[in-house]
Amino acid sequence: MVKLRLKRCGRKQRAAAVYRIVAIDGRSRREGKDLCKMGFYDSINSQTSLNIPAILYFLEKGAQPTATLFDIFKRAGVFYKFRKKVKG
């Protein structure tokens, strides 16, 4: 199963890490090989950059977002676009 999850990147020992949003095989570890990079999330500055078409593609194929990504996508309106695309 494909999961949408956060992959840690950036400097070591930083107070709060920067995460890349990726599609990855559910059995892989956090820093495993990803299928597609779809954006990033910076928890310090609360910045988020999303590749909406790629996210919608993987959601249509049945990918499951983690709880944290579910909240990020909800704030960004991804699920509204997903429902709109599925219905019509």
Image: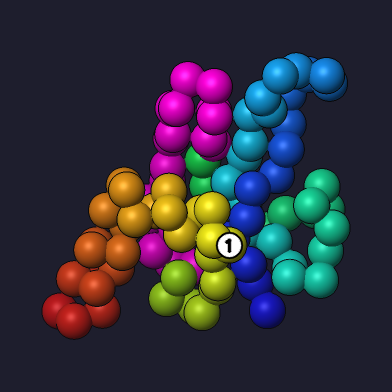
Number of numbered discs on residues: 1
Asked if residue 41 can be seen in this view, the reply is yes
Which residue ends up furthest to the left in the rendered image? 88
In screen coordinates, is 20 left or right of 25?
Answer: left
Task: Work out which quarter of the rendered image holds the N terminus and state it.
Answer: bottom right
Asked if residue 54 can be seen in this view, the reply is no
Q: Which residue is mark 1?
A: 66
In screen coordinates, is 18 left or right of 27?
Answer: left
Expressed as whole percent of the image width and height from the top left, the position of residue 46 reads 45, 27
Nearest the viewer among 63 and 74 is: 74
Expressed as whole percent of the image width and height from the top left, the position of residue 20 reads 62, 39
CA neighbours of label 1 inside 10 A, class few (<14), some (14 to 19), many (20+): few
Task: Work out which quarter of the rendered image holds the C terminus and state it.
Answer: bottom left
Amino acid type shown at disc 1: Thr
In screen coordinates, is 79 left or right of 6?
Answer: left
**Residue 48 higher or lower than 82, as above or below:** above
In screen coordinates, is 14 left or right of 82?
Answer: right
Verify whether residue 45 appears in magenta: yes
Say which quarter of the image contains residue 64: bottom right
Say which quarter of the image contains residue 87: bottom left
Element marked by disc 1: loop
**Magenta residues, as a range?**
40-58
Nearest the viewer among 26 and 88 is: 26
Expressed as whole percent of the image width and height from the top left, the position of residue 14 reads 75, 18
Coloring applied to the structure: rainbow
Residue visible at 79% across and 52% down in the picture: 30
Nearest the viewer among 44 and 33 is: 44
Residue visible at 50% across and 68% down in the picture: 58
